Amino acid sequence: MKAVVCGASGGIGQPLSLLLKASPLIDELALFDVVGTPGVTADLSHISSVAKVTGYLKEDDGLKKALTGADVVVIPAGVPRKPGMTRDDLFNINAGIVRDLITGVAESCPKAFILVISNPVNSTVPIAAEVMKKAGVFDPKRLFGVTTLDVVRAETFVQEITGEKDPSKTVIPVIGGHSGETIVPLFSMAKPAVNIPAEKLGPLVKRVQFGGDEVVQAKGGAGSATLSMAYAGYRFTRSVIKAVQGEKGIIEPSYVYLPGVEGGDAIAKETGVDFFSIPIELGPSGAESAQNVLSSVSSEEKQLLEACKRDLKGSIDKGVEFVANSPGAK
């Protein structure tokens, strides 16, 4: 099992690479970034675990060397929003980075499972899909937007109300997108069921939706949610690998191209969008099926879904248009 981290020297990339290096599921770990990879590689290579680590920079066909033979490609690459930077500035930089990396995937490992962490996920996953389509190698079952941090936050924040010792034992589906009001936590479907007092539900939902702001403020504007995102990225990667290796019954919410996944068409019709995060049954081919939970949502969650759908459509269109208007990937 060869895993590749694109953006391995960054704030998410380094702790994510550490977690993957420590995993017994991985035999080979290739690290790629535009700076810093030799140092990160040397450091991780001293850890006594199974995975053999190699590192590459852009020079000397580094991306191609990193991606060749990859089974799983995890992409946390990109820049965080800096003071004075508009959302459009951020979008244009990260959209270009994702486009170029996915072009490399299409050329060097088109059958790899692609896990996109780079923000804005609501747009970068459609960008990845469009690039793979242009190259004639798009397999919707193998492309995932990693929304697991929203799930991890929902599990953790609800624990403060339930008192459950291990928050990960409470399964809470989180659907929609991966930013602000597009994030819809379905506390009504928690297993085991959770009893949330009415006055606490609104603030709890908002905290899950805007948990990233909490971290940015706590870091004094000098950073964002990197460690928790690395953990969430690792958790989803581990689930994909276990499912690919034959473990049954693994279900994780993920942001996917609905028309290309079994059961996704009905969800696309109901939501009016082609990309949406929904609980996905994972298997050897990737996204085996999408679970339509929309009929079971509460009246409060229905209202959240309306706001989600409005926002999501614009973000998806923006990603598709970016690729359509690109002069061609580098």
Image: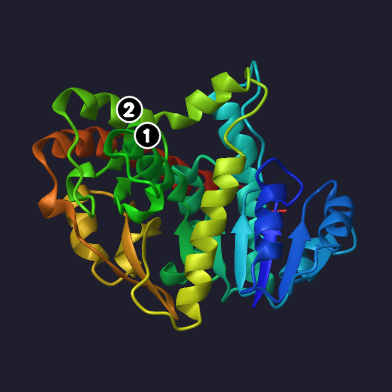
Q: Give the quarter of the image for residue 299.
A: top left
The residue lying at 60 percent from left, 48 percent from top is 230
The residue lying at 30 percent from left, 64 percent from top is 259
Q: Nearer the viewer, residue 34 or 38?
A: 38
The residue tagged 1 is 208
The residue tagged 2 is 206
Q: Is 326 displayed left or right of 28 in the figure? A: left
Secondary structure under tag 2 reads helix
Q: Nearer the viewer, residue 62 or 130?
A: 62
Res 275 seen here: no
Residues tagged 2 and 1 counted as in contact (Cβ below 8 A) = yes
Q: Nearer the viewer, residue 292 or 87?
A: 292
Position of the N terminus, as image quadrant, is bottom right
Label 2: few (<14), some (14–19) or many (≥20) C-alpha neighbours in 10 Å: some
Q: Between marks 2 and 1, how big is the CA–CA gap? A: 5 Å
The residue lying at 44 percent from left, 79 percent from top is 285
